[in-house]
Amino acid sequence: MRHSKRSKLTVDDINAALRVKNVEPLYGYACGETPRFRKTTANATDLYFVEDEEVDFDTILNKPLPKIPLDVTFTAHWLAIEGVQPAIPQNPTPSDAKADLLTKRPKHHAASNGINTDQVDVKPLVKHVLSKELQMYFERITEAVLSPEERLRSQAFESLRLDPGLHQLLPYFIQHIHKKVTQNHKNLEVLDAMLSMAHSLLNNKHLFVEPYVSTQHIQLNCR
């Protein structure tokens, strides 16, 4: 206060003095707008007091009552569990999401053999943002499991079995296995690679694969 050449001591002055003395400042008190003081004299002594705003009672009484505030309530639900969205009323259904996309996104017309068809890209309900490193890892693993070199295949299966950071890639691996099995149900080499890939993922102790077991069934009939 003295350094600022003021005659009024504020909370900020006390906190600044405490900081100079390496003492923890007071929390919970702050100096907002500068209060306005009025001066009066009592018994030949100057007294200063904070000026209060004059309130008109008639104006306050004639004002309408404010609305009753609503009580704060909280609800919780699972948006997604390990990348799978549960079917609950709070989450949109796939049909609702598709209808919303159809109304908001423009349609692209493609001509094929003189026939115009409407193609609409439907995005998944849960978005996954993969880093470039994870994308490169996914591409190299999917290529290595089908490599003719035994060393590359073994390294890929070992990585899928031991790597603890495959949570984000798990739904993509499951979809890749399902796609390859569906498209190559007569190619025993591809089926064997996909079975080994699925076996490695199931043996990975860091992954939680139960939500995907009920959604992606892979059945192989080898004779």
Image: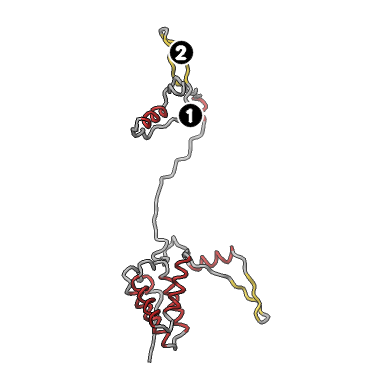
The amino acid marked with disc number 1 is Glu
Find disc 1 in the rendering and name its residue: 33
Point out the image quarter for the C terminus. bottom left
Q: Residue at point 37% right, 73% down?
A: 159
Residue found farthest to the bottom = 223
Frontmost residue, 196 versus 61: 196
Circles 1 and 2: CB atoms closer than 8 Å: no
Between the C-alphas of marks 1 and 2, the distance is 22 Å
Point out the image quarter for the N terminus. top left
Tell me the SS state at disc 1.
loop
Tell me the SS state at disc 2.
strand
Frontmost residue, 68 versus 138: 138
Find disc 2 in the rendering and name its residue: 40
Q: Residue at point 39% right, 54% down?
A: 75
Residue found farthest to the top = 44
Q: Quadrant of residue 49?
A: top left
Where in the figure is residue 128, as x and y percent of width and height?
Answer: 46, 65
Mark whose residue sits in front, 1 or 2 = 1
Mark 2 burial class by Cα count in 10 Å: few <14, some 14-19, many 20+: few
Where in the figure is residue 190, as x and y percent of width and height?
Answer: 43, 84
Looking at the image, residue 19 lies above or below residue 113: above
Frontmost residue, 103 versus 174: 174
The amino acid marked with disc number 2 is Thr
Nearest to N terminus: mark 1 or mark 2? 1
Task: State left or right for residue 132 relative to residue 81.
Answer: right
Q: Residue at point 43% right, 62% down?
A: 89
